[in-house]
Image: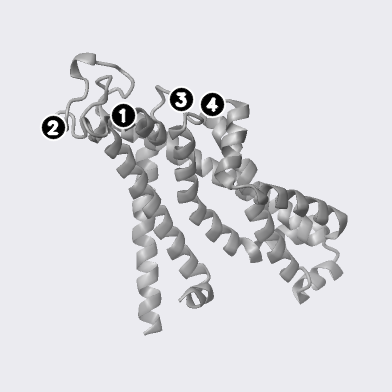
Amino acid sequence: MQKQVRDYTKLKLIVLSIFVLGLLVVAGLASYLVPYDPYVQDLSNALQPPDRIHILGTDRYGRDMLSRVIMGAQTTIYSALLLVVVITVIGSMVGMVCGYYGGILDSVIMRISDIFLAFPGMVFAIAVAGVTGGGIMNAIIALACISWPKFARLSRSQVIMTKNMDYIAAAKLAGSNTGIIIVRHILPNIAGPILITAVLDIGTMIMEIAGLSFLGLGAAPPVAEWGSMMSNGRSMIQTAPWVILAPGAAIFITVVLFNLLGDTVRDVLDPKQKKVNE
């Protein structure tokens, strides 16, 4: 029975990985896959409902919605991936240093992380994005400012549990310096929980980037970005619902895929956590 469960989990991981990889390929090759130029306006063709020519219809400027959704995938998904990589690397490095050395450095940095965690995340991101100005990079910076403490605390706790293990003591006796111990001995043993958290965070970051863009603090028009597209079409939800439903459905499907992938990665790398949750 357990073997069947493991086989099913591995098969689920393979299938979801194929879907996510396909999504990333489509986003990466968006410029070559779009049927129309997503930025060329044709006011004579504005707000056309979905048909055989424009499968998802057109927006108020006559731009093909399918082309803009595909191009928006590149902006939204890769921005979220960049954000997750940044906060994972920075947060994990900070947490490993604090957990390994401890002392005043650990206390100071952890108190700083407490300050960031004390504020509602999205509210703090809106404030930072508002100060730095609009633009997708400023949105990434704003979200990075509030998201790194999670990885710092996770990696710190893992390092504290790991640094007193016998194999760490053996590495010290063998003459390994601190850098080698952290990179070769500690990092591989704490990478699983960090990877699981990072994959699970991708869907959240997609929604938060789209949320900032929806509020006008992320990607600025005419850049094709799902949150910005929903913001531009919200006034036409009754007269031309496809303008807001198309990017909304894209966000929903993408977030669900990444969340399912994250759950499956957790089940594969940390089956004990799955039993606890059940």
Q: Helix, strand or loop at disc 1?
A: helix
Instruction: Give how far apart the Cα atoms at labels 4 and 2 are.
Output: 35 Å
Q: Dot 3 surroundings within 10 Å: few (below 14), some, or many (20 or more)?
A: some
Which of the two labelled residues, at mark 3 and mark 1, occupies the earlier sequence position? 3
Instruction: Give how far apart the Cα atoms at labels 4 and 1 are.
Output: 21 Å
Which part of the image, by quadrant, shows the N terminus? bottom left
Instruction: Give how far apart the Cα atoms at labels 1 and 2 are.
Output: 22 Å
Q: Residue at x 33, y 60 (%)?
A: 15
Amino acid type of the residue tagged 2 in the rendering:
Asp
Disc number for residue 235:
1
Q: Which residue position is annotated with label 3?
A: 220
Q: Helix, strand or loop at disc 2?
A: loop
Q: Nearer the viewer, mark 4 or mark 2?
A: 4
Instruction: Give how far apart the Cα atoms at labels 2 and 3 are.
Output: 28 Å
Which of the two labelled residues, at mark 4 and mark 1, occupies the earlier sequence position? 4
Amino acid type of the residue tagged 4 in the rendering:
Gly
Q: Which residue position is annotated with label 4?
A: 134
Amino acid type of the residue tagged 3 in the rendering:
Ala
Left or right: 194 in relation to 230: right
Q: Residue at x 45, y 44 (%)?
A: 207
Q: Are marks 3 and 4 in contact (CB under 8 Å)?
A: yes
Which of the two labelled residues, at mark 4 and mark 2, occupies the earlier sequence position? 2
Q: Which residue position is annotated with label 2?
A: 51
List x then y, in percent, for residue 64: 25, 26
Amino acid type of the residue tagged 1 in the rendering:
Ser
Which part of the image, by quadrant, shows the C terminus? bottom left
Which of the two labelled residues, at mark 3 and mark 4, occupies the earlier sequence position? 4
Q: Dot 2 surroundings within 10 Å: few (below 14), some, or many (20 or more)?
A: few
